Image (spheres, grey):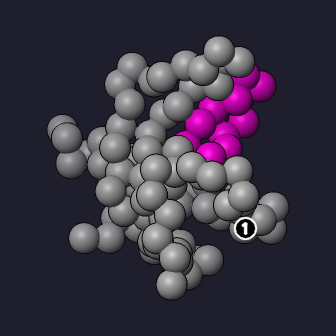
Amino acid sequence: MPVSDTPLDCRIVDVSLHSPPQVTPKGFRVLAGFTLLRRPLRIRDCSLVRAPTGTLHIWTPDPAVRISRAGHPELVEAVQEAVEAAKARLN
């Protein structure tokens, strides 16, 4: 069941919340995991992370797969909405 549709014609599904957030050795906090669907691709094991500077980023499981800078803000917003929806279902 899709959690969110983005303006980028992507869907965020399989949201998993990390509580407490995982922290990398460089200080990045992994807040949530998700799968990104964009026909014909299914990118599993993506992560929403907060950098030590406070900015949010999307990490993909393979460094060769990147989110374009043009679509990054919209995708981060869509993932945040999907995370909030997942939190609401837990309460």
- Between residue 9 and residue 77, name the one nearer to us: 9
Depicted 60 relative to depicted 17: above or below? below
Q: Quadrant of the N terminus?
A: bottom left
Vertical placement of residue 69 versus 2, above or below = above
Within 10 Å of disc 1 (Cα), the crowding (few <14, some 14-19, many 20+) is: few
Residue 88 magenta:
no
The image position of residue 75, as x and y in percent, is 61, 61
- Please give the residue where the numbered disc 1 appears in the rendered image: 71
The C terminus lies in quadrant: top left
Give the quadrant of residue 87.
top left
The image shows residue 38, relative to residue 50, as above or below, that is below
> Does residue 15 appear left or right of residue 44 in this picture?
left
Q: Which residues are magenta?
A: 48-59
Residue 49 lies, in percent from the top left, at 59, 36
Picture residue at 55% right of the left edge, 19% below the top = 23
Residue 86 in sight from this viewpoint: yes
Please give the name of the residue rendered at 72% of the width and 67% of the height, measured from the top-left corner.
71
Where residue 82 sits in the image (x, y, percent)? 41, 55
Q: Residue at x 35, y 25 (%)?
A: 19
Please name the residue shown 70% across and 50% down the image: 63
Q: Quadrant of residue 13?
A: bottom left
| Residue 72 seen anywhere in this rendered image of the structure | no
Count of marks placed on residues: 1
Indicate the secondary structure of the residue bearing disc 1.
loop
Q: In the figure, residue 24 lies in which quadrant?
A: top right
Q: Amino acid at mark 1?
A: Gly
